[in-house]
Image: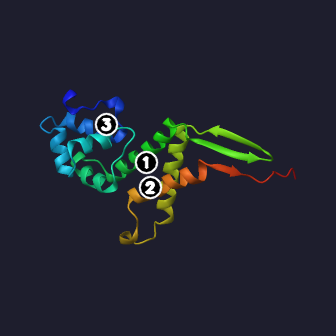
């Protein structure tokens, strides 16, 4: 594994998939895999790190090589983005109730559950749309991530509760 210049601890879940593929296929090295995907070895190594992710195009190219469904890669990519926010202590919810701001940290598990719930809600809403007109799962996960990030992880002002 030293020849890969990556270790599992520094990799995202996507990166660990790549490392597992290389372990399971000792006849393939990082350079060969990168060439199959159309990246440099450094580029492939970069997107395997926990602070980075592949683009949809790269994910589409590597999914069949890794024998992994593209939806799984999309899920891992956007879960990793939430984990990056957590590492930056940016997973918080602030609300102004009456005159006071209250901020609470959102557990990463809750943020990921929310991401996947929104993803499934999008799928439910577009289930009757013809297949050729539907966005890709990667695009849906991107939208779900944006919804979670914008709508749940930001300051909110709530109207004062009435006691009626």
The disc at residue 142 is: 2
Cα separation between marks 2 and 1: 7 Å
Which residue is depicted at the point 52% across and 51% down?
A: 117
Which residue is depicted at the point 36% across and 39% down?
A: 13
Q: How many marks?
A: 3
Image coords of residue 36 (percent x, y)? 17, 50
Q: Is residue 115 left or right of residue 70?
A: right
Element carrying mark 3: helix
For residue 24, which quarter of the picture?
top left
For residue 5, which quarter of the picture?
top left
Q: Are marks 2 and 3 in contact (CB under 8 Å)?
A: no
Mark 2 / mark 1, whichever is N-terminal: 1
Cα separation between marks 1 and 3: 15 Å
Q: Is residue 154 left or right of residue 143?
A: right
Q: Residues within 10 Å of mark 2 (few under 14, many from 20)?
A: some
Mark 2 / mark 3, whichever is N-terminal: 3
Image coords of residue 29 (percent x, y)? 16, 38
Mark 1 / mark 3, whichever is N-terminal: 3
The disc at residue 16 is: 3
Q: Which residue is mark 1?
A: 78
Image coords of residue 66 (percent x, y)? 24, 45
Quadrant including the N terminus: top left
Q: Are marks 1 and 3 in contact (CB under 8 Å)?
A: no
Q: Are marks 2 and 1 in contact (CB under 8 Å)?
A: yes
Element carrying mark 1: helix
Q: Is residue 88 left or right of residue 47?
A: right
Q: Is residue 43 above or below residue 56?
A: above
Cα separation between marks 2 and 3: 21 Å
Element carrying mark 2: helix
**Most foreground residue, 159 or 17:** 159
């Amino acid at each position: 594994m030293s020849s890969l210049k990556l270790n599992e601890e520094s990799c995202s879940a996507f990166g660990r998939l790549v490392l597992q593929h290389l372990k399971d296929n000792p006849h393939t090295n990082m350079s060969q895999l990168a060439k199959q995907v159309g990246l440099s070895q450094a580029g492939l190594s970069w997107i395997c790190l926990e602070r980075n992710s592949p683009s949809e195009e790269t994910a589409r190219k590597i999914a069949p090589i890794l024998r992994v469904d593209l939806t799984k890669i999309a899920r891992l990519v956007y879960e990793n983005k939430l984990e990056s926010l957590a590492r930056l202590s940016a997973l918080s919810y602030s609300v102004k109730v009456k005159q006071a701001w209250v901020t609470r940290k959102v557990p990463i598990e809750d943020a990921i559950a929310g991401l996947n719930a929104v993803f499934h809600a999008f799928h439910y809403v577009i289930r009757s749309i013809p297949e050729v007109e539907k966005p890709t799962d990667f695009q849906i996960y991107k939208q779900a991530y944006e919804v979670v990030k914008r709508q749940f992880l930001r300051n909110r002002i709530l109207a004062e509760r009435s006691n009626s």
